[in-house]
Image: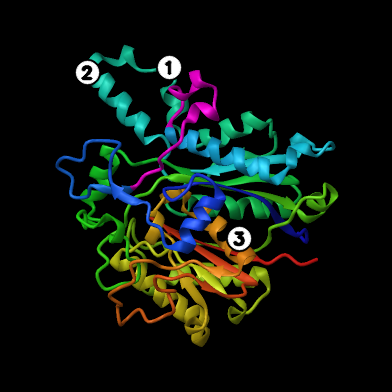
Amino acid sequence: MSNRIVVTGLGAVTPIGNDVESFWNSLITGKSGIDTVTSFDTTGLATTIAGEVKGIDFSEYVDPKMVNRTDRFILLAQVAARETVRNSGILDYADLDLNRVGTIVSSGIGGMQTLETETARIAEKGPRRASPFMIPMMIADMASGMVSIDYGFKGPNYGVVSACASGAHGIGDAFIALKAGMMEACLVGGTEATITRVAFAGFCAMKAMSTQNDTPQTASCPFTKNRDGFIMGEGSGLLMLETLEHAQKRGAKILAEVVGYGATGDAYHISSPVENGEGAQRAMKMALDMAKIKPSDIDYINAHGTSTPMNDRNETAAMKVVFGEHAYKVSISSTKSMTGHLLGASGGIEAVACIKAINESIVPPTTNYNIPDEDLDLDFTPNVAKARDITYAMSNNLGFGGHNVSLIFKKFAE
């Protein structure tokens, strides 16, 4: 498996921008997309804030009659796919073999809004009133299925479900499959739309989300002393990956190279990370080994950084073990401070952030970093973006169930 795998397209739909450039500009200027929830009645819930995607008319991207037959998590992926495919220019390649182009669009939960709406309808009106579109709207693989249909991509087609590591796992899977020769290109990433009353009720019952409702823009404050839980976000982040040979043959603009992938399991607890992030440690080491680089080669880490007490403490401990003294020299940030936590879509939009950071030589900040936690003493790029030449960037994503993923992207060089 010696093929080099490169990135040739990016797409993003997020709470801070509905395309890659607006998303990136918001990141580097510290713009928050978190505010009071507008999409449902939050009465009785402990958390009433989220990072909602706003300002999209899905009928501009999808046949209008299909919008009401398609769950929001699928629609978000279709919008991000449009940008990714267009920017990659892959459909302009005359010799494109659609049988060799895959689609791996992952989601941690899938069509939560559809499940919620249809359950209420069945309870009120009986099972015969269930929508015939309910199952294809709801199942988590359907974002990948619909996107592959949109473009005729007939290669490997599926979605990974591993909670908040789903999008990152999908990128890693595509990387391995491309290296193994199963396909020549793959549209890959994650999508999620779970800002619903039932989803909030479940996460609130776990006491997993922040209750700083009066100050929504500052409620997501990773690695700080006053962090009290994550803020839910929604959206989609996608990449076009290709073998270097395929990308060069069609004259594609190459944005970055994927060089490392680590995936491990905690085998510990359904929702709590193992002490000192032992599983995350092994994922980062695995990615470094695959990339054949030293820990000191990493310039930037886009941390999982959820703003929960346990994650931030254990992820920091894991980075200290893996990177040693270099942990104090590498630039780290959690872009979830601005976007909120997009669950299964996190790996997608955070991979986009890493690739933009490499190309623009800018580290996006961790915003709301106002009350440092003395036990978490690394360089979390507080509040303001900074210039830094980045050759290697790492993206970490961890999920309920003990799922750990680390990806490494490299500045492209012939």
Farthest residue in the left direction?
44
Residue 219 placement (x, y as % from top left): 28, 60
Circle 2: is it few (<14), some (14-19), or many (20+) Cα within 10 Å?
A: few
Residue on which the image places disc 2: 124
Locate the C terminus and report the quarter of the image it occupies: bottom right
Residue 296, compared with residue 1, is above or below; it is below
Report helix, strand or loop for mark 1.
loop
Q: Name the residue: 22% across, 55% down.
A: 207
Locate the N terminus and report the quarter of the image it occupies: bottom right
Give the main secondary structure, helix, strand or loop, of the magenta stretch.
loop
Sequence-wise first label, 1 or 3: 1
Foreground mark, 3 or 2, reads 3
Residue on which the image places disc 3: 355
Looking at the rendered structure, the kind of residue marked 2 is: Glu
The answer to whether one can see residue 265 in this image is: no
Sequence-wise first label, 3 or 2: 2
Residue on which the image places disc 1: 132
What stretch of residues is rendered in magenta?
A: 51-71
Circle 3: is it few (<14), some (14-19), or many (20+) Cα within 10 Å?
A: many
Residue 244 placement (x, y as % from top left): 78, 56
Asked if the residue at tag 2 contacts the one at tag 1, i.e. Cβ–Cβ closer than 8 Å, the answer is no
